[in-house]
Amino acid sequence: MPKLKREDREERATDFIESLDRGLRLLQTFGAEPQPMTLSDLAKAAELPRATARRILFTLERAGFVATDGKLFRLTPRVLLLASSYLASNHVVSVLQPALDRLSSEAQEISSMAILDGNDVVFIARASPTRIFSSGIDIGYRLPAFCTSVGRVLLSRLADDEVAAALDRMELAPLTPFTVTDKKQLLKTIVADRAQGYSLVDREAEPGFRSVSVPVRRYDGAIIAAINMGAHVDRVSAEEMVEKLLPRLREAAASVKSMLV
């Protein structure tokens, strides 16, 4: 990516709209609690003055994104328009979803697609066979990149020194007793995953769950997403994942490469 000229950087700095940034930050704070929040709680969570938070909430209410009973505030279904707009405009999702549907139907396992967002992976597409109850990981779900198979695949697109720097920026907190948090070991694993073209993570992100992932490459070979298949450890062994599920994942990823620009 070409570097921004000094005048371009300065122009972008002056074009920054602080009020919009604050409003978006306030919207994100609603996800911290599963129930409606007070003005004081929202202002504190967003690190905003109470008066500023009040004006923002009033604006969001007028726009239909927030509702209140006078004391508690909650998001309305209108915020889903933001997510649906992203999914509808995302070329990768539109191309991959049919491939995920076929993959899940043929293998009779859940399949998902994720992208990297900062230190996390975000799942943006999913398919599930009808025999499997759909729960847990869904569209919009976030997990730390370092301990997930999709995350390690996506990190592997970076050079070794960039992977090391990315790991330095992450909070490597264990999610299960099996989560690897040693930076040197993680770097070694991600480099090895890059060489073999896939990642297998066993009970590191969720107890009793293992998954295998492969990169999704666009026409020029650049990794733009990762797709995975996962199952409970009592039902599918690690060996079965590599022998039976990995070839299907690779086939699905290869089938869309020429369509991704």
Image (tube, grey):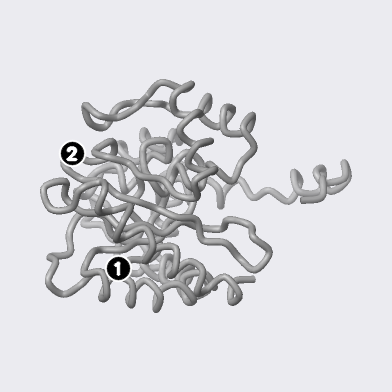
- Look at mark 2 in the image and give the residue it sits on: 207
- Residue 74 appears in the figure: no
Q: Nearer the viewer, mark 1 or mark 2?
A: 2
Q: Position of residue 167 (x, y in %)?
A: 51, 29
Q: Amino acid at mark 2?
A: Pro
Q: Amino acid at mark 1?
A: Pro
- Residue 256 appears in the figure: yes
Q: Position of residue 76 (x, y in %)?
A: 29, 64
Q: CA distance from mark 1 to mark 2?
A: 32 Å
Q: Position of residue 79 (x, y in %)?
A: 37, 64
* Relative to 110, 132 lies left or right: left
Name the quarter where the C terminus is drawn.
Answer: bottom right
Q: Position of residue 134 (x, y in %)?
A: 17, 64
Say whether disc 1 or disc 2 marks the residue closer to the N-terminus.
Answer: 1
| Foreground of the two, 209 or 47 | 209
At horizontal 28% and vertical 53% (from top left) the residue drawn is 241
- Look at mark 1 in the image and give the residue it sits on: 77
* Relative to 232, 65 lies left or right: right
| Foreground of the two, 90 or 75 | 90
**Mark 2 and mark 1 in contact (Cβ < 8 Å)?**
no
